[in-house]
Image (spheres, rainbow, N blue to C red):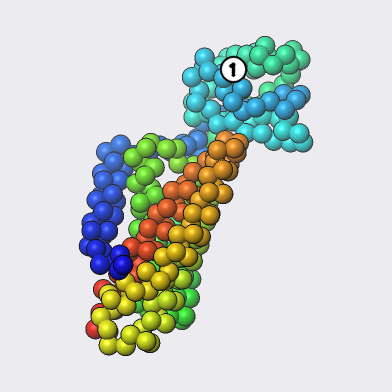
C-alpha cells in the first residue's frame, strides 16, 4: 500500500490548515471563555436539581451567554458565569427571574462577585510550562528508547497537533476555556502513544531492511501498524463521542477538543511522524 509515499501532500495539507488558522487568529483572534476574559459569577441554591439548559432558557432574555455549572450535594447549587460585568440591579433582576421561573422562596439568596482574567492567565502560564516539560520529557524518553531523530520527529508531530487543534477552534469560533487546556494535555499523551507504536515498528523493520531507503522502511512500517492504529483510535473516538452526545455541558466542553485531538493525533502519527523521521535522519 505504502500510503506515506504521498507525504508531501500531507505536509502541504497541514501547512495550509495551520497557516489559515494563524491568519484567522491574527485578524479575528480566538473566542476566549470566561476563565480567560473575566466577568461575573453568581451562585444560587435552587433547592432542587435543575438542568443547566432550563436555566439558560429562563435567562435568555438577558443575553448573557452564560456558563452554568452545578455544585454541592444533589446538584442543587447553581453557579452562573458570564463575561458581562453585572451591577447590583442586573443581578437582582436575574435572581427575580430565577425565583419566578423555578418557584423558589422569595428570600432566596444569590451571591455574586466580579473576577478578572488573572485565573485564566495563571492557567495558561502553568499549561505552557506543563507542555514544555512534557515535550522535554517525551524527547528524552524517545531518544533513550529509540534515537534522537525519532524524538525530534515526535515533538514536531505534537506541535503540529496543537497548532491544528487551535486552528480548528479559530475556524469554528469555539470557546477556549480551562477544559480546552486540560484536553490539550491529555491529547499530548494520546498522540505520542500512537507515534511510538509506529516508531517501534520502524526500528524493528530497520534491522530486517538494512540498506533500504528510510522512506521505504517507513512506508512498510506504517502499513503494518495501520489496522492497529485505526482500531484503537476509532474505539477511543466512539467512547468520547458518546460522552459528548450524552454528557452535561462541562463534559461536552472537555470531550469536543478530545475528539478533534484523536483525529488530528491519529493523522499525524500515520502520515507525518514517520516521514519526518525519514527526512530528518537521512544519511545520518
Q: Quadrant of residue 99?
A: top right
Q: Say few, some or many: other residues with alpha carbon within 10 Å of mark 1 (under 14 / 14 to 19 / 20 or more).
A: some
Residue nearest the observer in this picture, 211 or 191: 211
Where is residue 189 drawn, in percent x and y?
A: 50, 62
**Could one spot residue 93 in this view of the protein?**
yes
In the rendered view, would you say 39 is above or below 23?
above
In the rendered view, would you say 278 is above or below 265?
below
The residue most toward the front is 1
Left or right: residue 53 versus residue 147 is: right
| Residue at x-position 39% and y-position 49% | 165
What residue is shown with label 1? 58
Where is residue 167 drawn, in percent x and y?
A: 34, 46
Where is residue 210 drawn, in percent x and y?
A: 32, 88
In the rendered view, would you say 144 is above or below 60?
below
Q: Quadrant of residue 159?
A: bottom left
Left or right: residue 174 versus residue 20 is: right
**Could one spot residue 159 in this view of the protein?**
no
Residue nearest the observer in this picture, 107 or 57: 57
| Residue at x-position 42% and y-position 76% | 201
| Residue at x-position 29% and y-position 41% | 24
Q: Judging from the image, what secondary structure is the residue with disc 1 in?
A: helix
| Residue at x-position 50% and y-position 26% | 65
Question: Number of numbered discs present?
Answer: 1
Residue nearest the observer in this picture, 66 or 221: 221
Q: Quadrant of residue 284?
A: bottom left
Quadrant for the N terminus in the image: bottom left
Amino acid at each position: 500500500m505504502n500510503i506515506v509515499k504521498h507525504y508531501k501532500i500531507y505536509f502541504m495539507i497541514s501547512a495550509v490548515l495551520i497557516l489559515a488558522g494563524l491568519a484567522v487568529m491574527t485578524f479575528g483572534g480566538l473566542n476566549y471563555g470566561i476563565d480567560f476574559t473575566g466577568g461575573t459569577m453568581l451562585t444560587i441554591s435552587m433547592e432542587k436539581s435543575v438542568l443547566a439548559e432550563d436555566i439558560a432558557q429562563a435567562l435568555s432574555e438577558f443575553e448573557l451567554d452564560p456558563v452554568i455549572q452545578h455544585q454541592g450535594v444533589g446538584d442543587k447549587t447553581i453557579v452562573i458565569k458570564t463575561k458581562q460585568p453585572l451591577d447590583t440591579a442586573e443581578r437582582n433582576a436575574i435572581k427575580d427571574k430565577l425565583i419566578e421561573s423555578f418557584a423558589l422562596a422569595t428570600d432566596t439568596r444569590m451571591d455574586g462577585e466580579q473576577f478578572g482574567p488573572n485565573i485564566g492567565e495563571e492557567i495558561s502560564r502553568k499549561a505552557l510550562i506543563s507542555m514544555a516539560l512534557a515535550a522535554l520529557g517525551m524527547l528524552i524518553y524517545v531518544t533513550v528508547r529509540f534515537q534522537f531523530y525519532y524524538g525530534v520527529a515526535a515533538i514536531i508531530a505534537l506541535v503540529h497537533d496543537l497548532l491544528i487543534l487551535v486552528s480548528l477552534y479559530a475556524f469554528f469560533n469555539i470557546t477556549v476555556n480551562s477544559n480546552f487546556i486540560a484536553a490539550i494535555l491529555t491529547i499530548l499523551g494520546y498522540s505520542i502513544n500512537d507515534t511510538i507504536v509506529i516508531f517501534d515498528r520502524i526500528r524493528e523493520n530497520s534491522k530486517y531492511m538494512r540498506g533500504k531507503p528510510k522512506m521505504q522502511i517507513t512506508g512498510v512500517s506504517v502499513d503494518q501498524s495501520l489496522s492497529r492504529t485505526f482500531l484503537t483510535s476509532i474505539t477511543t473516538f466512539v467512547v468520547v463521542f458518546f460522552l459528548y452526545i450524552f454528557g452535561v455541558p462541562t463534559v461536552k466542553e472537555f470531550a469536543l477538543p478530545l475528539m478533534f485531538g484523536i483525529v488530528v493525533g491519529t493523522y499525524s502519527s500515520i502520515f507525518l511522524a514517520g516521514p519526518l523521521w525519514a527526512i530528518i535522519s537521512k544519511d545520518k
